[in-house]
Amino acid sequence: MNIVKSLLVLLEIFLFIFAMFCYFRKRYYFTAESWCFSIIIVFAIYSASIQIFFWSGIIQRFFIVDIIIIIISAYLTIKNNDVVYYFFKDLVNIFKLNRLILSFYSIIYVYLFLQVILLPPINVDSLTYNLSRVMLMIKEGSIVLKNYSTLHQVNFVWGYDILSYLFQRNYCDCFLSIFSYLSYILIILSNYALVISVFNNRRLAILISLIVSSLPALVLQATSTKPDIGAAACTMVMFLAGYNILLKNDKGSFLILVVAFLLGLSFRTYFPGIAVPFVLLIMVSFVRKYSIKDNKY
């Protein structure tokens, strides 16, 4: 029964991501961009809502969030059904142009996904504190633990780890690495989106994405329950949003940049070392760009 509940949660996550994809695609973002933004927004909403319910002491009523998400997701998907049609049409066209290589890599991606679905978590660090502290939070009904077995369970940020609550509340260890797998897919798609935006070359974008997806560290992280790949996904979304802000003057990407920045801070303690210099660089570039424009006039 617990596995069935967890499977329903998994379907809810997929539906939510697809609904957000329809939302962003309808606003004329590229397909790959829309997938990246939708995944990071779904991560942010789940992570923030779980923490809010824990802090409010009403985590037992989190099913209310599930109901709201399912209703909104169904509404967005039905409302933007034309996006669904064109997405699958574009997907078929891409496969026709690169059938051999994409078929080969698709087998690898499916294999990794099956590991996520079928295998329990085995990472020692995850079992010691990443996942175990979420179980302690569920038991105590609080995000601030009074009882713990190692300092790692209380002195690390919990934004990514708390996502496992969606499955652990059912006392089931199935599908716990789905967030790492989604982060892996996001990193691949963000590289594709950046190359398309900069060079406008689909074949080059596919080549770069496949090379990135073959990096050993990423492949190994794709089926783990460690937060590092989640922080990497936030970084890539920041690059993508930053490009849109500077080159396309896209105001919506500024919100995405802020969300990815804050989410990354809650994922890993070392994230500021990456994100703060990047944000400062974006700010300086933005100011210089518009100061040059003003000087022209």
Image (tube, helix red, strand yellow):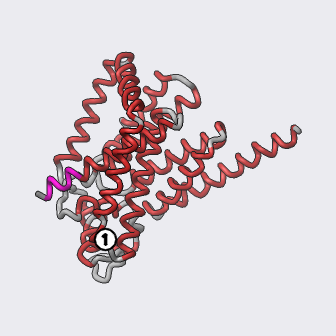
Whether the magenta-drawn stretch holds residue 3 is answered as yes
In the figure, 218 relative to 62: above or below? above
Question: In the orientation shown, which residue stands out farthest toward the top?
Answer: 97
For the point 23% across and 65% down, which residue is it?
Answer: 169
Which quarter shows the C terminus?
Answer: top right
Q: Position of residue 8 (x, y in %)?
A: 21, 51
Residue in front for this viewpoint, 178 or 4: 4
Between residue 238 and residue 139, name the one nearer to us.
Answer: 139
Q: Which residues are magenta?
A: 2-8
In this rendering, is residue 29 above or below 256? above
Residue 292: which quarter of the image? top right
Residue 102: where, in percent of width, then height? Answer: 33, 24
The answer to whether residue 8 is above or below residue 153 is above
Q: Residue at x 43, y 36 (%)?
A: 189
Q: Which amino acid type is marked by label 1?
A: Ile
In the picture, residue 22 is in which quadrant?
A: top left
Q: Main secondary structure of the magenta part?
A: helix
Mark 1 packing: few (<14 Cα in 10 Å), some, or many (20+)?
Answer: many
* Front position in the image: 158 or 104: 158
Classify residue 104 by image quadrant: top left
Q: Residue at x 33, y 77 (%)?
A: 142
> Residue 170 magenta-drawn?
no
Check the image and report above or below for 69 versus 21: below
In the visual, does 191 lie left or right of 198?
left
Residue at point 54%, 42% (across, down): 240
Q: How many marks?
A: 1
Q: Is residue 182 visible?
A: no
User: Residue 284 appears at what percent x and percent y?
Assistant: 71, 50
Q: Which residue is mark 1?
A: 59
Q: Is residue 116 visible?
A: yes
Q: Which residue occupies the extreme left position in the image? A: 1
Q: Quadrant of the N terminus?
A: bottom left
